[in-house]
Image (cartoon, rainbow, N blue to C red):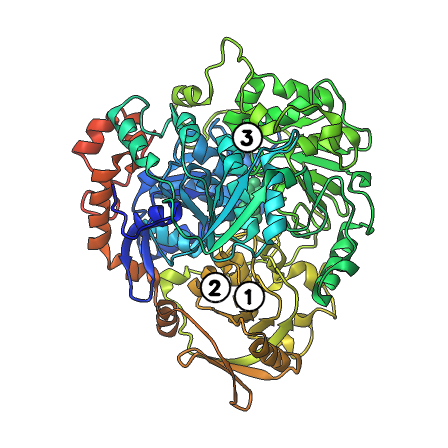
């Protein structure tokens, strides 16, 4: 096993340490990545960059792709191919582009006709692709989900996707260690979703910034893997890079028989389990941040505002912003209430709901569906509910639910039973809210416009959403159903399956190889058309945007220009660029979509109040934001692309969300964190006055227009070096080929089950023999193999 170098260590320290390929003096680390999940939204520009630079995918055997965000969840009975199935042009282009790329680069892919297709964070665990102690990345913020297995799993931007595809490594830094310990016993009717919503309410959406959270304590231990996934999934909403749970018997039990896990009962399985058992924090390990939660304080929880930290017990009332501690918070609270159409003091249980969505990578697994079905069985949704949807997280979840008869329970109660996909979680597909519609949703983000322009989202657990559907208002599930314990614990136990049921893993094994959808189904007339009334702007590309890493970056030395002032806290990437503009396959042309909802009052009509619509800020090269946690939420690199395209090359704020921060550097932009309030106020005052400021990166100072120093700033040495010299960091990493190859040889000896052995077994090579005798095909080495690997 990889040697532990510092003791005592946390779980995070151990997994991180075991993947270090190289470490620089300034703490910049080249980290090896074991598992890479790919979806259609954040990969096109990465593949394009590879192609332009003539690079290959280094480890197709450790890469798995699917389509999930754009796909309609309507019946696929008449599916012919994805191109004819998806009606919306941009969505279709992204999906078709992924299919072309997986063919071109030889990557395993689950298409729409494959039962294993689904939300990327559901299918990885389901297949045993996600394993304890691995590093897992995806161009998607909710990659944190996979931490439930004791994996170090985190979201990355598109430039980093390209970096991982080309090198199987990532340039990163150590994160802080944070521990959230939840002890006691969950009260009847309280789910793991309530645990995580409660925790985010306690720490805030920036509470975990720069940290990896380890969830532990008796409550976490008592939960199933699926319930743990719901918790790790939302670590990102608490601002953290990742969430982790130490693997235990519950984890090993879940992995038995999974197609890509080491074969249960084999020598490799025993070796793997022995290693996995070592993956727990040492008794005296130190954490930078420690949070304790007593389970008895957790009740069924819902959100009231437009940030996941705006939580309240279902027994509570809509809060009054006048009671909030600062003027900024009062103003933000007031805006949220207006957006959400709520009045302070209203009991949460009096809030009438229009739609119900049970799905998303947080809550679309079989236990979620069982728990929701338990609530609705034999009952009817309320007459005011316009639409109630159940969207299984994958084709296999759907199939299992059907085997258990859950679909019938839902349909009889008035729910729609849909096909797998992200669905109404973010409205990149036809499932969206109409303006001002209110939704009880099991997803993870309640940002403005998240589920459709002007839609109103309340986050909650699957049983709470089911209860809301029955009552027609936000409802306390404990009044609707009887519980002895946590719904999740109860749902973890499968009902007696019908005699014919083979279980998802067994079925996946029996399923024929289907890399790309080719079935000759008849085309179905699609009834689900986009309802999103948000005005369209032109996102047509101005040039091919060859990919910054391939082309090299413009050098960043001294930047002089107008700085635009902003004051909001938690400016999320959905606000910087909403979902409808993520459908481009280029990096350019997004400037007109920047801050879309705030910038335009109607299609093409600028809101004169918005700062970037006023002179001199139309020419801004810098944003100065006094609110913390800039760029939180989704990993979309479209956010820095839009800023860049508008002309903004630097953002100054008290703090940044980790993924946005990284993404900015990858695009030759400089995010500057100024924690000192007085310094920040000085810079902000220049911005408010409409004067130019000067950012001198080599000397690390900000000056006013007269050349007087306003303040200094910190920047990591390696990042500065790359920016000042316009360096292509993929090229830099590729120069480390010897070290990477040496690391891979060591991993093949110590953790051979990570070498895509499941793939090899599927080719009839026999995992053990194949792994020992022949190293996995690596496209950038001498033993080049470019044809697609099939399972
Ligand atoms: C599209 C993708 C970049 C995004 C994410 O990173 O989270 C999406 O999954 C979301 O939930 O907003
Ligand atoms: S958060 Fe929603 S949109 Fe993002 S991956 Fe999960 S289900 Fe898909």
Left or right position of 267 against 567: left
* N-terminal label among 1 and 2: 1
Q: Which residue is mark 1?
A: 643
Left or right of 76? Residue 175 is left
Q: Is disc 3's CB within 8 Å of ligand 2?
A: no
Q: Residue at x 41, y 60 (%)?
A: 546
149 and 546: which is toward the camera: 149
- In the image, ligand 2 is in what quadrant? top right
What is the x, y in percent for residue 524?
Answer: 61, 28
Mark 3: few/some/many CA within 10 Å (<14, 14-19, 20+): many
Instruction: Depth check: give the residue in front, 87 or 652.
Output: 652
Instruction: Please state the horizontal and vertical placement of residue 545, each as a whole percent of the image.
Output: 45, 61
Q: Which mark is residue 441?
A: none
Marks 1,2: beta carbons within 8 A: yes
Q: Foreground mark, 1 or 3? A: 3
**Of callouts 1 and 3, which one flags the residue occurring earlier in the amino acid sequence?**
3
Tag shown at residue 664: 2
What whole-number distance in Å separates the C-alpha atoms at marks 1 and 3? 36 Å
The answer to which image quadrant residue 184 occupies is top right
In the picture of the structure, the residue carrying the numbered disc 3 is 365
């Amino acid at each position: 096993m990889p040697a532990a170098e510092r003791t005592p260590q946390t779980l995070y320290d151990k997994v991180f340490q075991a993947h270090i390929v190289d470490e620089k003096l300034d703490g910049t680390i080249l980290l090896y990545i074991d598992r890479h999940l790919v979806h259609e939204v954040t990969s096109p520009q990465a593949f394009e960059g590879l192609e332009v630079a003539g690079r290959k995918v280094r480890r197709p055997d450790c890469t798995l792709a699917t389509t999930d965000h754009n796909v309609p969840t309507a019946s696929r009975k008449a599916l012919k191919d994805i191109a004819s199935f998806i009606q919306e042009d941009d969505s279709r282009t992204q999906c078709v582009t992924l299919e072309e790329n997986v063919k071109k680069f030889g990557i395993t892919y689950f298409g729409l006709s494959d039962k294993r297709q689904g939300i990327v964070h559901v299918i990885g665990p389901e297949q045993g692709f996600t394993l304890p102690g691995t590093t897992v990345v995806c161009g998607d913020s909710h990659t944190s989900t996979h931490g439930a297995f004791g994996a170090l799993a985190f979201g990355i931007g598109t430039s980093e996707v390209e970096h991982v595809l080309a090198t199987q490594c990532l340039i990163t830094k150590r994160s802080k260690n944070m521990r959230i310990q939840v002890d006691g016993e969950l009260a009847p009717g309280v789910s793991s979703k309530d645990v995580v919503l409660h925790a985010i309410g306690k720490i805030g959406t920036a509470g975990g910034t720069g940290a990896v959270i380890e969830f532990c304590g008796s409550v976490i231990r008592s939960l199933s893997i699926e319930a743990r996934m719901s918790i790790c999934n939302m670590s990102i909403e608490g601002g953290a890079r990742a969430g982790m749970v130490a693997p235990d018997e519950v984890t090993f039990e879940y992995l038995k028989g999974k197609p890509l896990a080491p074969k249960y009962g084999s020598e490799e399985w025993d070796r793997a389990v022995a290693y996995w058992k070592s993956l727990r924090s040492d008794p005296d390990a130190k954490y930078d941040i420690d949070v304790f939660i007593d389970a008895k304080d957790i009740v069924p929880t819902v959100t009231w505002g437009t940030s996941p930290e705006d939580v309240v017990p279902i027994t509570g009332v809509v809060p009054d912003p006048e009671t909030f501690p600062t003027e900024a918070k009062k103003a933000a609270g007031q805006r949220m209430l207006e957006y959400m159409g709520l009045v302070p003091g209203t009991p949460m249980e009096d809030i009438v709901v229009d739609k119900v969505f049970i799905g998303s990578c947080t809550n679309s697994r079989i236990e979620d569906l069982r728990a929701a079905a338990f609530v609705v069985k034999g009952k009817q949704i309320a007459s005011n509910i316009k639409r109630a949807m159940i969207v299984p997280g994958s084709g296999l979840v759907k199939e299992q639910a059907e085997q258990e008869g859950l679909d019938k329970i839902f349909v009889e109660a008035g729910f729609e039973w849909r096909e797998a996909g992200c669905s109404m979680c973010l409205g990149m597909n036809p499932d969206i809210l109409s303006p001002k519609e209110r939704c009880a949703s099991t997803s993870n983000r309640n940002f403005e416009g998240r589920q459709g322009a002007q839609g109103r989202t309340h986050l909650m657990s699957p049983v709470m959403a089911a209860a809301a559907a029955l009552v027609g208002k936000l409802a306390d599930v404990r009044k609707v159903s009887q519980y002895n314990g946590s719904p999740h614990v109860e749902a973890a136990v499968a009902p007696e399956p019908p005699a014919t049921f083979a279980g998802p893993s067994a079925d996946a094994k029996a399923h024929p190889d289907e890399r790309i959808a080719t079935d000759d189904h008849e085309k179905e007339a699609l009834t689900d058309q986009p309802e999103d009334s948000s005005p369209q702007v032109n996102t047509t590309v101005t040039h091919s945007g060859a990919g910054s890493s391939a082309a090299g970056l413009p050098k960043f030395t001294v930047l002089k220009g107008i700085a635009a002032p902003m004051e909001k806290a938690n400016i999320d990437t959905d606000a910087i660029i909403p979902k409808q503009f993520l459908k481009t396959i280029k990096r350019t042309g997004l400037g007109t979509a920047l801050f879309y909802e705030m910038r335009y009052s109607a299609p093409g009509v600028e809101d004169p109040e918005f700062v970037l619509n006023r002179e001199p800020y139309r020419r801004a090269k810098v944003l100065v934001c006094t609110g913390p946690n800039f760029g939180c939420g989704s990993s979309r690199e479209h956010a820095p692309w839009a800023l860049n395209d508008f002309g903004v090359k630097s953002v100054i704020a008290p703090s940044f969300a980790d993924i946005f921060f990284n993404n900015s550097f990858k695009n030759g932009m400089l995010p500057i964190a100024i924690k000192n309030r007085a310094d920040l106020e000085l810079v902000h005052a220049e911005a408010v006055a409409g004067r130019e400021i000067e950012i001198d990166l080599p000397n690390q100072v900000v000056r006013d227009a007269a050349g007087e120093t306003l303040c200094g700033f910190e920047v990591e040495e390696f990042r500065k070096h790359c920016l000042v010299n316009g360096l292509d960091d993929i090229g830099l990493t590729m120069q480390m080929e010897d070290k990477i190859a040496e690391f891979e040889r060591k991993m093949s000896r110590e953790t051979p089950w990570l070498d895509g052995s499941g793939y090899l077994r599927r080719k009839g090579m026999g995992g053990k023999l194949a792994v020992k005798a022949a190293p996995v095909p690596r496209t950038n080495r001498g033993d080049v193999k470019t044809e697609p690997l099939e399972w």
